[in-house]
Structures are given as C-alpha cells and as structure tokens.
Image (cartoon, rainbow, N blue to C red):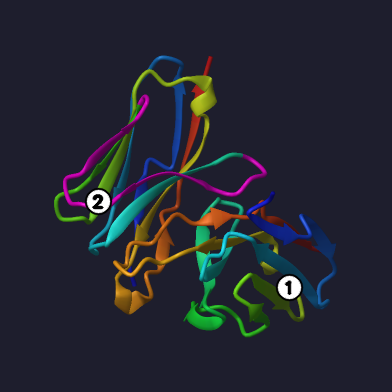
Amino acid sequence: TQLLEQSPQFLSIQEGENLTVYCNSSSVFSSLQWYRQEPGEGPVLLVTVVTGGEVKKLKRLTFQFGDARKDSSLHITAAQPGDTGLYLCAGVGSRGSNYKLTFGKGTLLTVNP
Amino acid sequence: DTAVSQTPKYLVTQMGNDKSIKCEQNLGHDTMYWYKQDSKKFLKIMFSYNNKELIINETVPNRFSPKSPDKAHLNLHINSLELGDSAVYFCASSHVRRTGVNTEAFFGQGTRLTVV
C-alpha cells in the first residue's frame, strides 16, 4: 500500500509570511499532484510534477518533486488570505496499481490578515 | 457546463436506510472514482472504474456497491446505512494516458451524507 505523509496538518500564519508543506512517502510515484480544496467544494488541481527533481512555479507557489520521486514540497511566498484552504498532495501509482491516485491527509492553511 | 456533477449535495437519512448517490461526467474521461472524506478531511479512495470496469476496490464494506452503467456515470448505492458512514463523498473522473501519466482528477462538489 502506498502511503503519503503530509505535514504539517494545520498551519496558521500571518499575511506576508512564507511557508512550506511537505509530502513524503517510502514509495515511488509515477507523478505527483497538488490540489487545493475550499470549503464546500471538491479539490482542484494546482500542478502535476512528473520528473525527479522537477520544480514548477505558479505565481507565488513553488512545487518540487524529489529526485527519487518519493517526496514533494509546496512553498508559498508572501502568503495572502486568499491562499487559505486545504492543500492535498496526491501520488499517482504505477500501472500495476491501475495508476491509483493516493491522497495525503492534507494541510489546512489559514492565512490571517 | 458542470464537468462532474453529483446528486444530491446533501443527504440526511436514518440508520438502516438504503440510499444512492449519482455521478455524471461530461469530460469524456475513461476513469471515474468514489472518494470518502471524513471529518478530519482525509480523502480516501473507495472505488475506481475504467471504461465501466471495476479496477480499484479498497477495503470498503460490501454495503457499498458502485454501479457504472456507462463511462460517463458512476453511481454509489449504500445499504443499511450506519452512523459511521456520515462523511462527504466525492465523485471524480480522469483520463489515464498511454504513458501512464494520470491527467488531473476533476471532482464533483461532494455529497454530504449525515446518518442519524
């Protein structure tokens, strides 16, 4: 069973601060996705990283995939109240697992004005 | 147009009842999923269908029975509902490319099931 450990589980910061969310596993994933979920809605994809060591930037958000494709991080620079939400990482398994999408337990981020 | 739509959005029912949640996607995806999100926000996969064929069946009580009449629909029927079944259930769809890279999963808005 492929498990994803996501940390921290809760994060409350002030506007303008930086933060990093981590997603770790002992398993290798073919790719890894980051989602953001707002209250009353389903998760929405932010980014997919595929290659080990890959770094992708989405405005103030920087996503990195570990060299061994077992871990990933999400760094937010100068957080804003609009960044508040539940951030979920999801690993895509291999063909043998029918490319199962396994989610981490999420990081609930609150950015205070 | 809504990409993945599930109904109902809210469902309050008594223990022991049988209920169904419907899901439809208009994205032309070949894979559909049911996820359960508990009160701690943990999103756990329950089932996955690829081209109407069940490909993932996690450890879920057999009171839960998915049905896929066609590639665009995946319904979830729950028998003999229990208090512990209370959660938000999400339907999702995606398309798995030949390279094995799973495109993004599009989620419905969720069905908040409350068993009383």
Badge 1 element: loop
Q: Nearer the viewer, residue B25 or A66?
A: B25
Q: Residue at x 35, y 76 (%)?
A: A97
Badge 2 element: strand
Q: Amino acid at mark 2?
A: Asp
Image mark 2: chain: A
Q: Which mark is residue A52?
A: none
- Mark 2, residue position: A71
Judge whether residue A41 is colored magenta.
yes
A68 to the left or right of B75: left
Q: Nearer the viewer, residue A96 or B43?
A: A96
- Mark 1, residue position: B82
Q: Amino acid at mark 1?
A: Glu
Q: Residue at x 38, y 40 (%)?
A: A8
Name the quadrant containing residue B103.
Answer: bottom left
The x and y percentages for residue A2 are 33, 67
Q: Are marks 1 and 2 in contact (CB under 8 Å)?
A: no
Q: Residues within 10 Å of mark 1 (few under 14, many from 20)?
A: some
Q: Residue at x 58, y 55 (%)?
A: B107
Q: Residues within 10 Å of mark 2 (few under 14, many from 20)?
A: many
Q: Which residues are magenta?
A: A39-60
- From what the image shows, is residue A88 above or below residue A70? above
The x and y percentages for residue A38 are 59, 39
Q: Nearer the viewer, residue A102 or B94?
A: B94
Image mark 1: chain: B
Q: Residue at x 45, y 54 (%)?
A: B104
